[in-house]
Image: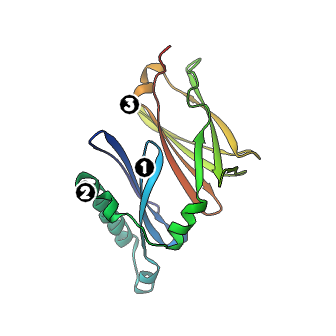
Amino acid sequence: MIFGFNTDIKQGDTVYHVQSEARESELLLQTQVFVRGRCIGKRATPYGDKLASGFTDQQKEHGLRDQHRLVLDAIRDGRLDEILDKRETPETLAAIKELDVQWLNASSVHADRNLTMRLRVTESGSGVPGARLTVRFARPDAAPFYAQVVTDPAGDTEMKIEVDESSLPDSSVLVQASYSGRTATRKFQLRKVEA
């Protein structure tokens, strides 16, 4: 079973995007915190040792929900740094070589009811060929839609999103890149560029 939680929470002038997911391949319940599309920290709870005693999907979801709530409460209370992982685990060490997603033409112009997004997936600064990107486009006037694209040999890909220009300021794009069992997630807020 695949499940996860996504919440935007504002504290002061900062909007935090909190994303929690069960990472089956690594046997982790992971919560990541993003500010302006950049991951600023994680909290991960391994559950491999609980599998032998019959750790169910329901228990996994309950644990992930509790962890997600813990991070949201820490943001509200101004103590986020206290609960983020600082120890050297395989997960935190892997973050050094973590994937990154960049929006290459972020200042692009909306034309013919389309927004064209050129994206690049990198690892340690080099383009990653064959990375799979799952894109969630959310806008206020319609249900979110999803698309998948794969990067070319340089680590780049392009997608067109049909959207009315007037709804750009209230729309967002969540992009998750997957490659060799690792993922990177970025959230991009769209805005109307003033001429």
Eyeballing the image, is 29 above or below 160?
Answer: below
Ranked by sequence position, the earlier of labels 2 and 1 is 1
- Describe the element under mark 1 as helix, strand or loop: strand
Provide the residue designation for mark 3: 140
Nearest to N terminus: mark 2 or mark 3: 2
Give the class, few, some or many, for how many residues have Cα within 10 Å of label 1's Cα (few <14, many ≥20): some
The structure residue drawn at horizontal position 27% and vertical position 58%, both measured from the top left corner, is 79
Number of the label disc, if any, that sits on residue 73: 2
Query: Could you tell me if residue 113 is visible in this image?
Result: yes
Residue 31 makes an appearance in the image: no
Q: Contact, CB < 8 Å: mark 2 with mark 1?
A: no
Question: Relative to residue 174, is residue 180 depicted above or below?
Answer: below
Q: Residue at x 66, y 36 (%)?
A: 158
Q: Quadrant of residue 90?
A: bottom right
| Between 22 and 126, the one nearer to me in the picture | 126
Residue located at (42% from left, 49% from top): 34
Q: Amino acid at mark 2?
A: Asp
Q: Secondary structure at mark 2?
A: helix
Identify which residue, 45 or 13, lies in the foreground. Answer: 13
The residue tagged 1 is 34
Q: Which residue is the extreme one toward the top?
A: 195
- Identify the amino acid type marked 1: Phe
